[in-house]
Amino acid sequence: MISNEIKEQMINWRHQIHCHPEAAFEEKETSSLVAKVLTDLGLEVHTGIGGTGVVGVLRCGSGARRIGLRADMDCNKIVEQGEHPYTSQNHGRMHACGHDGHTATLLGVAAALSQSRDFNGTVYFIFQPAEEPGLGAQAMLDDGLLERFPMDEVYGFHNFPNLPKGTVSVRPGQFMASEDDFKISIHGKGGHSSAPHDTKDPLVAAAEMIMAMQTIVSRNVDAQEPAVLSFTELHTDGAMNAIPSNVTLSGDVRTYSAQVQSMIEAKMRQICEHICGMNDMAYEFEYIHAFVPMVNDEELTNQVVEAAKQIVGSGNVNSNANRISGSEDFARISAKVPGCYFALGSSQYDDPNVEPPLHNALFNYNDDILVLGAELLVQIVHQRLTV
């Protein structure tokens, strides 16, 4: 299905992108490469969508059905420690999450389908910027992605180095968590630590807040519904012998449903208001919905499972995988169009636990799964856009 020529092209594209990584909304060189490849393949190409996003359009036959295939292009702000001929040349930038492989894979799909033209309908190849901060999908949507390229369904995937190479994991419904980032600033009255009665101690209020918010999940969320609320930072302007005037707390929340997501935010706001009111302190509460939950459409999940069985074999497909606590910007697109997102195992070792994980300075995409990913997406196109 994927020729040796296209395989070699995918490897070359991947290495070139890995060598020149670009972070969120910096992806000018990457998007230029993508646009040139798509143009050379004869696709209709649209650039500058959501800043640096690219969409390639390939039509074949008279079919009215339209599907989207999406890959992310941005890198991480990490100093690469691995050594290979294509090590990052941009200091402080590194493809530590495999978006170079995702982009090369989707280019391979475009190459294969542009040659075969054995489908009936329209395929949109969506190359998204800024997935890491969770901003790129919304930027493309705000720039008219779905109005300019109306699609009936959309698919995406991610490599998972903790899963055996050549395996596919997916599940219908809740698959990946949302991520909400919060910052709480508490303003009291600082003073000498020997005279706390002359102060309004925001550190004590912060401690009360941290402990009170631990009950939000344990006493409000169904035990069958995963949710995590984590405080990760606490900063004050105090000293060893000085009670602070200001305390800042920050952290994040992970949930799998919009209902639980909204409830946790509301409870956090209530606790802030009442604890600060009780202690006669002012506060600011900032809550950012960085990522929405990734919910897979059941019918499209079944299509991915069937396609995966054809490519990697039934024994290598997990159709009821555990939910993933990480987040994915693709979810903003699939919240508006039926979609499915799946995990493609990529471990290069018999024991996946020795593989450098995603976002590690030693991570390196496994080129052996480039063809598998491309063939799986091509198979989905053939199933959904039959001649």
Image (cartoon, rainbow, N blue to C red):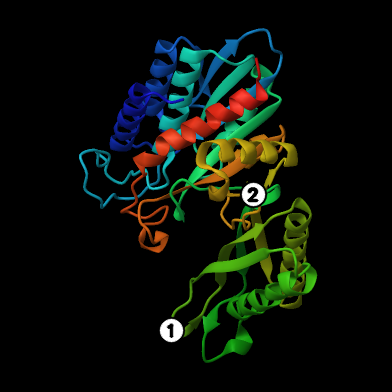
Q: Residues within 10 Å of mark 1 (few under 14, many from 20)?
A: few
Instruction: From the top left corner, tell me how far across and down residue 248 is, in percent.
Output: 56, 66
- Against 381, residue 335 (above or below) is below
Instruction: From the top left corner, tell me how far across and down residue 283 is, in percent.
Output: 66, 64
User: Residue 98 is drawn in which quadrant?
Assistant: top left
The number of numbered discs placed on residues in the rendered structure image is 2
State which quarter of the image contains the C terminus.
top right
Of 122 and 239, nearer the camera is: 122
- Identified by mark 1, the residue type is Met
User: Residue 287 is drawn in which quadrant?
Assistant: bottom right
What residue would you read off at disc 2?
319
User: Residue 198 is drawn in which quadrant?
Assistant: bottom right
Going from N to C along the chain, the mark reached first, 1 or 2, is 1
- Identified by mark 2, the residue type is Ser
Instruction: From the top left corner, tell me how far across and down residue 175 is, in percent.
Output: 65, 51
Left/right placement of residue 27 relative to residue 272 reads: left
- Against 341, residue 122 (above or below) is above
Left/right placement of residue 323 relative to residue 12 reads: right
Which residue is painted at 65% across and 60% down in the image? 284
- Against 72, residue 249 (above or below) is below
Left/right placement of residue 341 relative to residue 19 reads: right
- Against 40, residue 19 (above or below) is below
Which residue is painted at 63% across and 38% down in the image? 306
Of 114 and 23, nearer the camera is: 114
What residue would you read off at disc 1?
240
